[in-house]
Amino acid sequence: MADFAHSIFPMPNRQVSYARDAEAHLRANDPILARIIAEVGPLIITRRSERFQALARTIIFQQLAGAAATAIYNRMLALYPGTKFPSAEQILATPDEDLRKAGLSAKKALYIKDLAGHIRDGTLNFHRFHRMTDDEIIVDLTRVKGIGRWTAEIFLMFNLGRPDVLPADDLGVQTAVKRAYRMRERPSRKRLTKFGKRWSPYRTAAAWYLWRSLDIKLPDDAAKAPAKSGKKK
């Protein structure tokens, strides 16, 4: 979900340039999203500058509560005093035992070193991403151990500022669509991908608004809410 994505891809850089066009497009093409936009307000997606750091963080944060993951992440950073974030070469030169002492599992230490190896060897080159399509970047990133499609999609949305990404496996987006469009069950990836074509070329903005819609009450929610007795306890 959006808050989790922000926790693993922190440090805002600059607001995406497509915000106004995306809002206008979604309001014009989807009355339900138009209602959500009216409730949520302006699109606020910041494009973030980290690359290696962001992907390493998401590996650490996988399947952990935010506080525990943050503590491990900070202990790992403490292994490299005087640096904002270690280089790929520094990570590769670090004994696995030191990474384990910082709290990383053996599997996550392997994943981070695999990521560092791809960067060092140039098989993962962030400088060529601007010439690549979203699908090509997803393929490139998911060759790295520990990086799945969801991570690649969130990276495209929040780090590369790509406007037309729909994380169709995301539980939050699926839940929001089920709720807003009165579906009987959460849509599958296949169904949501087809359903989301109406939001293109601004599916990133649609996903952001759907995440935020889970924080607001829709008209039907008010009707379902139990009446308060008014009696003092």
Image (spheres, rainbow, N blue to C red):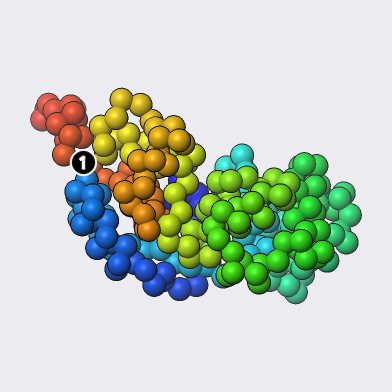
Amino acid type of disc 1? Answer: Leu
Between 112 and 64, the one nearer to me in the picture: 112
Looking at the rendered structure, the number of numbered marks drawn on it comes to 1
Q: Is residue 13 above or below residue 61?
A: below
Q: Dividing the picture into quarters, in which one does residue 40 lie?
A: bottom left
The residue nearer to you, when weighing 77 against 157, is 157
Q: Is residue 230 left or right of residue 185?
A: left
Picture quarter with the C terminus: top left
Please say if 85 is above or below 180.
below
- State whether residue 90 appears in this view: no
Residue 227 placement (x, y as % from top left): 13, 28
Percent x, y of residue 69:
63, 48
Which residue is disc 1 drawn over? 218
Crowd band around label 1 with a 10 angstrom C-alpha radius: few (<14), some (14–19), many (20+): some
What residue is drawn where x is 76% and y is 61%?
123
Residue visible at 64% across and 51% down?
139
Determine which quarter of the picture holds residue 117: bottom right
Visible residue check, residue 73? yes
Residue 58 image point, x, y percent: 62, 51
Q: Residue at x 80, y 47 (%)?
A: 110
- Above or below residue 1? Residue 44 is below
The vertical placement of 175 against 60, above or below, is above
Element under disc 1: loop
Residue occupying image coordinates x 39% and y 50%: 207
